Image: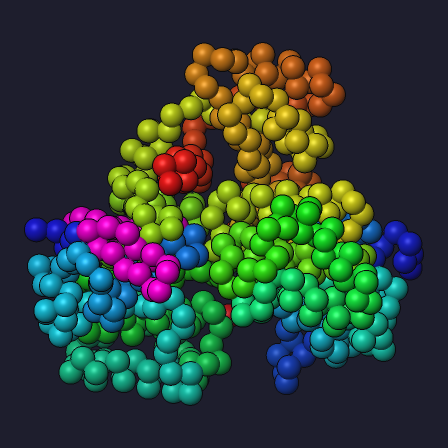
Amino acid sequence: MNENTDIIIVEQLTKKFGNFTAVDHISFRVHRGEIFGFLGANGAGKTTAMKILCGLSLPTSGGGTVNGYDLCREQEKIKRHIGYMSQKFSLYADLKVWENIRLFGGIYGLSGKRIRQKSDEMLRYLNMTDLRDELVGDLPLGWKQKLAFSIALIHEPAIVFLDEPTGGVDPETRRLFWDLICETAEAGTTIFVTTHYMDEAEYCDRVSIMVDGVIADLDTPAALKQRHQAADMDAVFRKLAYQAKRE
Amino acid sequence: MGAIEVDEVSKRYGTCQALERVSLDIRAGEIYGLIGPDGAGKTSLFRILVTLLLPDSGHARVEGLDVVKDFMAIRRRIGYMPGRFSLYQDLTVAENLDFFATMFGTTVADNYENIREIYSQIEPFRDRRAGKLSGGMKQKLALCCALVHRPTVLFLDEPTTGVDAVSRKEFWNMLYRIREAGVTILVSTPYMDEASLCDRISLIQQGHIIETGTPAAIVAQYPHRLFGVSGHPAYPLLKYLRRRNDLLRCFSFGSEHHVAVAPGTIAPDELQTQIRAAGFSDATVHEIEPNIEDCFMELAKKERQKA
């Protein structure tokens, strides 16, 4: 195992619910600094696997590390050292922009001084300084998402998990959000992202595709397209996902 | 007479103008797509058309019936699948279907032929509670419940949101078979690639219809030349393209960047030479057809400039 080059190391990870095996002996690694796409059909086991990687659920067997912390024994340390953002839950709509930053900064144990510093930095970077006293609920969706993403990074985690971050967003905002992802990756943060937009899979350095609880394939988009003789990632995904047997 | 006619409908919630003078004319037997991001007003318009919400102003008719005055008659002849899963989670598959049939004064047996093709796929799970179904099966059950009383107009509010690419393809194939039976279908989606699957579409943004037509006609009206540019590394290439001031717009579309260029300014091979000289030695540039997302971004920008 090399924790210097691989931020996620997973070996034979398995999760069973009763006699249903949601995640079935998967093994893979995520390199430090890459954008890693985690794809799969509905019900393929993506969410279950992601919950384990975020320290929210224990595997039935197998294991691994995230940023050097053990998936079975160091869940609290994992939670502290990762960032997480999903489309469904992001920020508190009835708190102001600065209050949301203050809240999440506090949750991650940053000092008051550090939070003020990060807050100024963040709002300047997002061009949102004038909006610090607005209620988050009143912001357009695109701004909300950019803010949620930046807040997920407030404690400067080495890796951030993004669960369908661009669902339902207009085409331009969706692309501007990916600019932000690429900038963040360039600055050295590892990105672990799920999406239903297959064009977004092309922006990842490597992509894994889960089918029926196992990783059906994992490689760069270019290598996947070549191996499956597909014009784009949508065709790769469909070829693999059609093999699914379970409902 | 159109199957669904919307005439200058507006709706406001407090200070939020959800719909502003929206007009649509949807023909009998077509699949009509309402395409736009979250918060564009799609659900408000659906709720007005299925008689669950009153418009502030304007008129709308479904098969000639007024959505305000004739609401009971409309309810009997339409099927509605709301965006959020709205079946009873603690009833079984068969109980949900029975319930909806009974609500419309009919039985599943009388209408079995109408739903057979879709229902047969979930019938093996007829005794499972709806809350325990997978996403794809929930969607099929919801569609069966919306079809069980043989509606002539079907309203599907974001039926494919959060559904994977394979299940989305299957769902659209089901819609084509429903259309063959003569049913008018109004469907909303935030996925722009689904626009090309509709007979006609309206693009909606912030309560305004920004364009209406067949997908092909909307694409044909795109005002610029469009080049597909690929090369490595992709993100620095995008930033390089944006720094140039002779290109109108640059956005990523999967493995390619789409670059809008004013006609007569620069040719693809010229741009390719310059990009390669700037250090992207494997870059290629070729002219491409715009897709609905290109058009949506262009029209949304024009709309913003108007405002």
Q: Taking the image as drawn, is residue A20 in sight?
A: yes
Is B205 or B203 nearer to us in this picture? B205
Q: Is residue B181 left or right of residue B270?
A: left
Q: Is residue B87 left or right of residue A7?
A: left
| Quadrant in the picture for residue A30 | bottom right
Q: Position of residue A210 (x, y in %)?
A: 63, 60
A39 is higher (above) or lower (below) than B82: above
Q: Is residue A106 left or right of residue B191?
A: right
Q: Is residue A85 left or right of residue B217?
A: right
Give the residues in magenta: B8-36
Residue drawn at the location 80% of the way across and 70% of the way down: A109
B115 is higher (above) or lower (below) than B223: below
B111 is higher (above) or lower (below) than B55: below
Give the number of callouts.
Answer: 0
Residue drawn at the location 38% of the way across and 48% of the way down: B205
Is B256 or B264 nearer to us in this picture? B264
Say whether residue B21 is magenta. Answer: yes
Residue drawn at the location 26% of the way across and 44% of the way down: B200
Say whether residue A29 is magenta. Answer: no
Which is the main secondary structure of the residues drawn in magenta?
Answer: strand
Q: Position of residue A179 (x, y in %)?
A: 64, 42
According to the image, what is the colour scheme of the structure?
rainbow
Residue drawn at the location 65% of the way across and 23% of the way down: B283
Q: Position of residue B63 (x, y in %)?
A: 11, 59
Q: Taking the image as drawn, is residue A159 in sight?
A: no
Q: Position of residue B102 (x, y in %)?
A: 21, 84
Is B132 or B5 nearer to us in this picture? B5
Tell me the quarter of the image containing the C terminus of chain B: top left
